[in-house]
Amino acid sequence: MNDAPRIAAVDLTKRFKEKLAVDSVSFTVGRGEFFGFLGPNGAGKTTTIKMLCGLMKPTSGQVLVAGRDVAADPLGVKARIGILPDTIETFDRLTGWELVVFSGLMHGVAEEEAERRAGRLLDLVDLEPADRARLVIDYSLGMRKKAALACALIHGPEVLFLDEPFNGIDAISTQVIQKVLQGLTAKGLTIFYTSHVLEVVEKLCTRIAVIHEGRLRGIGTVAELGAQAGLGPAAALDDVFVTLVGRTVSQGGDLDWVGSPPPSPS
Amino acid sequence: MIRHLRLLAYLRWKYLLRAGGRSRRIGAGVSLVVSLAIAAGLYFYSSATLGLLFEKQPPGMSWELVHLAFAVIYFFWLYSGSFNDLYDPARLASFPVAPRTLFLGSTLASFIGMASIFGGALLAGFAVGVPGDPFERVVRALLFVLLIAHLQMTARLIRLTFLAVLTSRRWRDAAVLISTLIGGGMYVATQLFRTESGVEAVAAVKRFAESGGPSAWLAWCPGVWLSWAYQLDGARSAAGFGAFALVTALIHRAGGWAEERLAFSEPIFQHRPKRDAGSARVPFLKGISRAVLRGVGPAAAAVTRKELAIFFRDPVVRHRVLSSVFYILVPFVMLFVVRSGGAKSEALAVGGFILLFVEMFFLTNIFGFEGAAVRNLLWFPASRRHLFLGKNLAYFALFAPFNAVVLVVLAAATGVPERIPAGLASHFSALLVVFGLGNVTSVYFPMPFLAPGQRVSRRDESGCLMMLARSLLYLLTFALLSPVLAVSLLVQGKPVAILVAFAGLAYAGALYAIGLKISERALLRREEALGDYFRAA
């Protein structure tokens, strides 16, 4: 049971009219893995994540999350996963505390237990007691992310989907949360993580998949990806990524006006 | 399911308490008192009207009018019912809530708020006004509650069905215009009802009810099915209730299906974006900005071009412009309504005043368009004088030709074409003064531009002071204009009028230059405050 993959995508495909957003993507993610999912803008990352979370139906293919078929039992899957989206649209007229407790209650956690867990989680993400009593509408981006992360964890999910979770969070809190997340994977939590910050992906993730133009371009450890890209196992992730998606990086040499004196303002 | 329904109601309750923020509890209290007063009015009006109706008219006709009222309530409720963003499927999609529970929960939660206040008042009015024993009144009250639930469900189903279209930018822009036109149309309709044609309309409604029209012609409307049930008179009532209950159950089922589709990011009707029609106007914008470029340089030209582009694309501006049309029509209406020739000749002065009044909205708040983006504008190293000049030139390019045409047409229509040169010169003098003082007002007393239905989100209490200060500045504008206007009136129709008018132009030009200087210096001092204001607004 424990060895069964927590996420299994089989020939996952999504077509929007003429555009093939995700094309026959297959992969599995095991229990306790910190799995990175990378791709340039428009590569099909968000569409894939939405299908994995039961927020979008695939055109074809199958997804199993926490042992359940997402298409057949979307509510069962939602009860077992936590989601921290990139853009947080939430109930911003609740206080941070109320929001986290509300999230626990919606997932079926008993009220007293939800309050106990909310306190613990908000301590963990370093949201001060005074801030917990403020309305979420008055939060900074980083505080919203912290509250949303607490919401995603309060019901004890088996799989956690994180989309740019550290965007807007200060360096110290980032370090703390990273350590907590790594600790949770040791306890069996599976984390599906997307970010454009390759250094953090390289630091945290045990395995990484790279998607581009809807197709999976590589999957494995950084060393395995390096080999798949033909750069060798010692290659840095950013070089591997650029090679796998088939891009070249311009040096900006054609911007001939940069470096010359600016025009005098009128 | 009960747990989720309770939590959805909790959300609604919290939002109702915190509408507008915690520091607006007094405002929320005032709005509650006003709502209760309106609800009391609705109760007394409906109960008294129904009581009188059943007392003075035969029961058949009275019931026909009740059927008509139910049809009107049905459609008015669906028209005015707003979508509750709180229960936007996208926000709740990550929770393990069954779609039908969400649909039912949003319906039940809508009873916490205005629906229960106004609907409850109508309910009580209909229960008391229509004769019957206590048992019948209780049954009718329950039927009315069912009607409100049905209407809330139907309104949500319609919104869910067209959600992707309704939340598109193109539709939001169009909605602003449509609501303005409907608002204006309703105003015209209420004016008509005060006249003889209104009396005729009431008589027509009576004839329609007497002939059994509502039952015959509105038999397809679910609201009328329920009013048959409300009549409590045997087979037709039972059939009406049965049909209404069946449709309500179908709507609930369809609502669950719609919620499920949207939870999977599958809109029922997809919005298809089209190419931006705004690009077609680029040659016009380029033409104006080229002329400005030659006169005052690239920064002012860029500002002019930006202002003109926004003016043609911003839905709030379209709303204001459309609303203003009703004011600008006043002097033309005067020509037909006012019978005395003397008063008719004043249409030119009234027209000029109304044009200034309408355009003041834009000219005294020139950073309102930018809103929070004013910081971006102020980051540029352009001279502040050129920012003002760019904006002023854009508005001059828009308003001056329009005003000139309106005034010339008015002068010609009122038979005073000889007043055109002096009238135009006086008007443009006034416009220049408004430009100059408008720049100062814009720096010291900014205001956010709001779309209809949008509320200011800032939390401090300086709004009233700001409005007072703005009003004083308006008075100052008129005080500064008064010499021009007074002399113009004194010499009206005399040969010297044209000379006086051009002297007035020079006076206004000097005032504009002084205003520009003051606002330029003020902006340099108040840039940070201005940015903070719009960020908080």
Image (spheres, coloured by chain):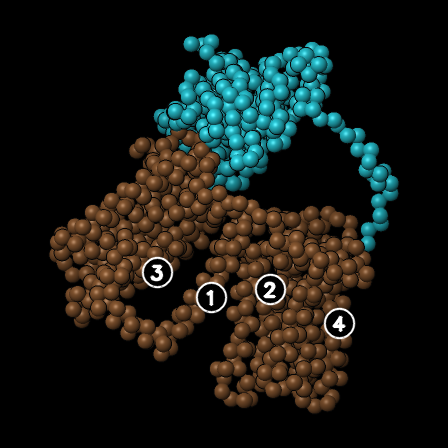
Chain colours: A cyan, B brown
| Marks 1 and 2 on same chain | yes
Tell me whether circle 1 and circle 2 mark residues in contact (CB < 8 Å).
no
Return the chain for callout 2: B
Q: Check disc 4 and report the residue beneath it.
A: B509
Distance CA(mark 1)–CA(mark 3): 22 Å
Task: Check residue B38 in the rendering and tell me which mark sits there, or answer none.
Answer: 3
Q: Is residue A190 above or below residue B8?
A: above
Q: Position of residue B99 (x, y in %)?
A: 37, 35
Task: Say if residue A31 shows up in the picture.
Answer: yes
Q: Say whether residue B499 is left or right of residue A217.
A: right
Q: Position of residue B299 (x, y in %)?
A: 77, 54
Residue B157 lies in what quarter of the image? top left
Instruction: Look at the numbered discs 1 and 4 and tell me whether their residues touch, using CB distance below 8 Å.
Output: no
Closer to us: B302 or A126? B302
Question: The residue marked by circle 1 belongs to what chain?
Answer: B
Q: Are marks 3 and 4 in contact (CB under 8 Å)?
A: no
Q: Residue at x 45, y 10 (%)?
A: A2
Q: Secondary structure at mark 1?
A: helix
Of the 4 image quadrants, the one containing the N terminus of chain B is top left
Q: Which residue is mark 1?
A: B184
- Give the residue at x 45% y 63%: B183
Name the subunit of mark 4: B
Q: Secondary structure at mark 3?
A: helix
| Label 1: how many Cα within 10 Å (few below 14, some 14–19, many 20+) | some
Q: Amino acid at mark 4?
A: Gly
Q: Is residue B77 above or below residue A224?
A: below
Seen in the image, is A7 located left or right of residue B468? Answer: left
- In the image: residue B205, left or right of residue B276: left
